[in-house]
Image (spheres, rainbow, N blue to C red):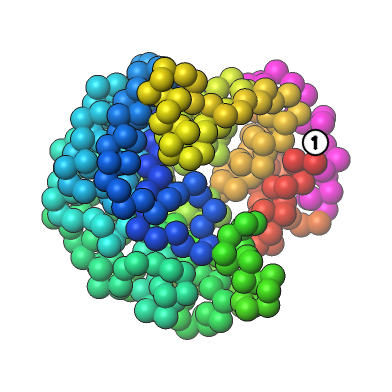
Amino acid sequence: MAQSPDPEAGGGTSLYVHVPFCVVKCGYCDFNSYVVEDRTVHDRFLDALDRELAEVWRGRPVTVFLGGGTPSLLDAERFARLFVVLAKHVDLHACAEVSMEANPESLTVEKARIARAAGVNRASIGVQSFDAAQLRFLDRAHTAEGAERAFAALREAGFENISLDLMFGIPGEMPELWTADLERALTLGPDHLSCYNLTFEPGTRLTHAMQQGRVVPNDEERDRLMFLHTRERLAAAGFVAYEVSNFAGRGGPCRHNDHYWLQGDYVGVGPGASSHRAGVRTTNLKTVDSWARAALDGLPCAASAETLHPAQRAGEALWLGIRRADGVDLARVEARLDWPVRAHFAATIDRQVQAGMIMRVGDRVRLTQAGLLLADRVGSDYLQ
């Protein structure tokens, strides 16, 4: 499982560890996460994670990502045990990038030091906003000052690569408020920023509220202005927009996410985690109890499996890759999949070029400025 020397070849396999616990289920969130205060459930999760890793993981990952949920929600004892479990199966210190998500309300200096000593070298804090009203609307459990304390805790623990997650396009948000959030984030001196336009995901409380007329989304023009301001301001601050919503500073791009966008193989462990290997996608049982029962009984944790046909794999390669600033090299995708990618998507690509959504130079296609604003729509054309 050695990393390929070609950064666009999708070589090697990454590992994703899903810790599904949160202090509150945010109304906009469609991730597989649960509010569970019973710490015996956390213990059972760690026991099951150990068993699943023993069954499904071998070798050295290209990258490791601990996500959720909120890994930092585990108390210090169980948080330390999480890394004891991982160390039995993965040498985190030998990985170029080991990322961990954390939320401000549960991250402490003690936990940050545990993670850093265990080999985590990149942390991502779910800030979303520094404004009290916005945080309440988003159901976030922290304050602006709590976010700043979490950032300071990571620095004190020795983290040199810290990313902040921020969100704009919150209903009723004006550009001035988003500008204030962005400036306060920059004052901290982060090494990477992820700035997402709030989306109304199916099945969430936020979408239900919109459908009932209790929440009205921002108009597209307001969100467009905030999106463009983000790119201009962060460029001026020395950040590189390497993907539609992600900006690399001193810490560089997130290698783990780039591995996904390049359609590299990955193994996901934990409730509801997905894996993709050589065109076969599996998804684990979703609930903590069903997943843990399977893992502890030595049974497969996957609830579903799908073998992608070549057109699906090619379509997803373009759908994911077009979000990158470098775009997609069609010839490389074609060679990797051994399938006529350029011929199959020729009409779609020509139409997008004529519409001004993408540009093509040789075999590489990437979004134009106009296309950046409609990246999801452009990408979905490849999935038809």
Q: Which picture quadrant has residue 132? A: bottom left
Magenta stretch contains residue 353: yes
- Asked whether, in this view, residue 14 is left or right of residue 286, the answer is left
Q: Secondary structure at mark 1?
A: loop
> Is residue 183 in view from this perspective?
no
Image quadrant containing the C terminus: top right
Q: Position of residue 349 (x, y in %)?
A: 79, 43
Q: Position of residue 327 (x, y in %)?
A: 61, 43
Mark 1 burial class by Cα count in 10 Å: few <14, some 14-19, many 20+: some
* 133 in relation to 191, above or below: below
> Is residue 216 in view from this perspective?
yes
- Asked whether, in this view, residue 352 is left or right of residue 149, the answer is right
The amino acid type, in three-letter code, at marker 1 is Phe
- The residue wearing badge 1 is 345
* 298 in relation to 259, above or below: above
Q: Position of residue 368 (x, y in %)?
A: 67, 56
Q: Decide which of 51, 138 is in the foreground and name it.
A: 51
Image quadrant containing the N terminus: top left
Magenta segment, which residues?
A: 334-354
* 115 in relation to 59, above or below: below
Q: Position of residue 311 (x, y in %)?
A: 76, 29
Residue drawn where x is 46% and y is 62% of the image: 26
